[in-house]
Image (cartoon, rainbow, N blue to C red):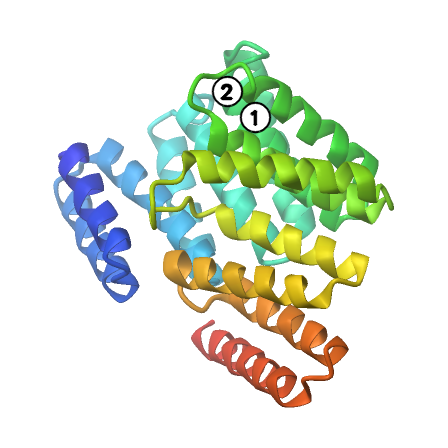
Amino acid sequence: MNAEIFFKQLDELFQKNEIDKVEPYLLRELEKAREAEDYPGYIVIGNEMIGFYRSISSYKKAFDIAEDVLLLMEEIQLDTSEHFATTLLNTATAYRAAGELESAYRYYLQALKIYEELLAEDDYRFAGLYNNMSLLLEQMDKNEGAIELTEKALSIVRKLEGSEVQQATSLTNLALLYFKLDRAKDASEALKDALLLFEQAGNGDETDAHYSAALAGVGEAYYRMGDYKNALLSYEKALAEVKKHFGENQSYGVLCENCAAVCECLKEEEKAQQYRTKAEEIYQGLKVEQ
């Protein structure tokens, strides 16, 4: 496998928003690696597939390829390696997205143990792990622990050159946690900094995939402050970003529900119903696929 060519072609599909061509491409490349007994290539492609299936909410497919890759890595004795930890992290994130929180936590802890044995405590890879574990703890309603991990992630990425997107992502996560603990002022400041960083890192229409989360956070901020007009504008911008990067996935459906709730506050019942109908269509489609 030529990794440079593989990622170049994969990136081109995303840049052209040809999401429907991504899975067939990944499956073809995975089969080529299997036939050639190219284990490193198989592992790389498999990890990309875990992330892709998670992003389009095809969780069973994500779990299946994750199990396949992890078993392969155990067989070739890579189960104490950094690469194994990365696969564990990707697997955990897929389980978290699917709402299977205990399984996700178990995989994150396995990854953390390997990282602690292999990496310096300020290694940038810890930041990604801390951010993901923070999101999980939030879902488990352990918000103080989630804030602690997000702050640890932020302290690492702030030391890295060209880390605007990573900083913005951590700040967005931190803001949403502050909201949960009724720390609205802290949340607003964190979101202000996050949006500024995302805009600095952007290049015209080329925005980072995580930008949608920041926009959604801003929408929540406006909603909590009773500024429903700006809340709707932010949520609708987030919808466009999610669709551009991932298609109409589960997150898109959740944002449609948020838009519906804001429209009700604005007394725009017809528009609210349109968003509710769209959300239901997406959820039904995901059930059929899974």
Residue 100: percent from left, percent from top: 64, 55
Question: In the orientation shown, which residue stands out farthest toward the right?
Answer: 182
User: How many residues crowd around disc 1 within 10 Å: few (fewer than 14), some, or many (20 or more)?
Assistant: many
Q: Is residue 259 above or below residue 35?
A: below
Question: In the orientation shown, which residue stands out farthest toward the bottom?
Answer: 270
Question: Do labels 1 and 2 touch, CB within 8 Å?
Answer: yes
Residue 135: percent from left, percent from top: 66, 43
What quarter of the picture does the N terminus occupy? top left
Q: Amino acid at mark 2?
A: Tyr
Which residue in the structure is indicated by mark 2? 124
Residue 168 in the figure: left or right of residue 258: left
Residue beneath the point at 71% across and 74% down: 261
Residue 127: image tag: 1
Residue beneath the point at 17% across and 47% down: 9
Residue 254 seen in this snapshot: yes
Residue 76 in the figure: left or right of residue 92: left
**From mark 1 to mark 2, how far is it between C-alphas?**
5 Å
Determine which quarter of the picture holds residue 28: bottom left
